Image (cartoon, rainbow, N blue to C red):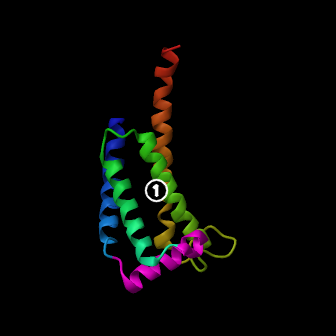
Amino acid sequence: MNLSHLPLRLVIGAFFVNSGMSKRSLDGEAAAGVHGMAAQAIPAIKRVEPRQFGRLLSGSEIALGAALLLPIIPSAVVGAGLLGFSAGLMRLYWATPGLHEPGDIRPTQQGIPFAKDAWLVGAGLTLILDDLIGRVPALLKGR
């Protein structure tokens, strides 16, 4: 891990662990609400029971957060996980009516809390690219 990745990984990792921990006990209406919104954006989620989806979401967030916090895991690897997770969030933003104006990427007032997750896409790409680009000199040296 590049030392310059540490602040990004610590902040995002702690955020994800906290978010996942807060979803551990999703039940009833809360689980149904999160599940319904996700299923609208990603139809395959409809096959998963809402409470089980809440547990899977919670576990995924905790695992991703822990991976970000562990410096032994390469930044490109955790960046790929972060990019995948955030791509799902952006799919949710784009597929949910009322979060953005039709045909426009800019968020409505209701969409701002969801559109802000775009920074996670940038962070994931940054971790991947910086880690891979940082390996190029070592690869060239080994020729």
Residue at x-position 58% and y-position 76%: 40
Main SS of the magenta part reads helix
Residue 110 seen: no
The x, y position of residue 67, in whole percent, is 35, 49
- Above or below residue 34? Residue 21 is above
Which residue sits at x=32%, y=38%? 72
**In the rendered picture of this protein, how many numbered marks are placed on residues?**
1
Residue 42 is covered by the magenta coloring: yes
State the residue in front, 70 or 57: 57
Q: Depth check: 20 or 100 in front?
A: 20
Q: Position of residue 14 (x, y in %)?
A: 30, 57
Q: Amino acid at mark 1?
A: Leu
Q: Is residue 122 above or below residue 46?
A: above
The magenta region covers 26-47
Quadrant containing the N terminus is top left
Identify which residue is drawn at 47% across, 63% down: 117
Tell me if 55 is positioned left or right of 37 in this view: left
Q: Is residue 71 above or below residue 137?
A: below
Q: Residue 98 sits in which quadrant?
A: bottom right
* Residue 32 on the magenta span: yes
SS for callout 1: helix
Q: Is residue 134 visible?
A: yes
Q: Dot 1: few (<14), some (14–19), or many (≥20) neighbours within 10 Å?
A: many
Q: Residue at x 41, y 41 (%)?
A: 75
Up/down of 121 relative to 90, above or below:
above
Which residue lies under the disc numbered 1? 120
Q: Position of residue 131 (x, y in %)?
A: 45, 36
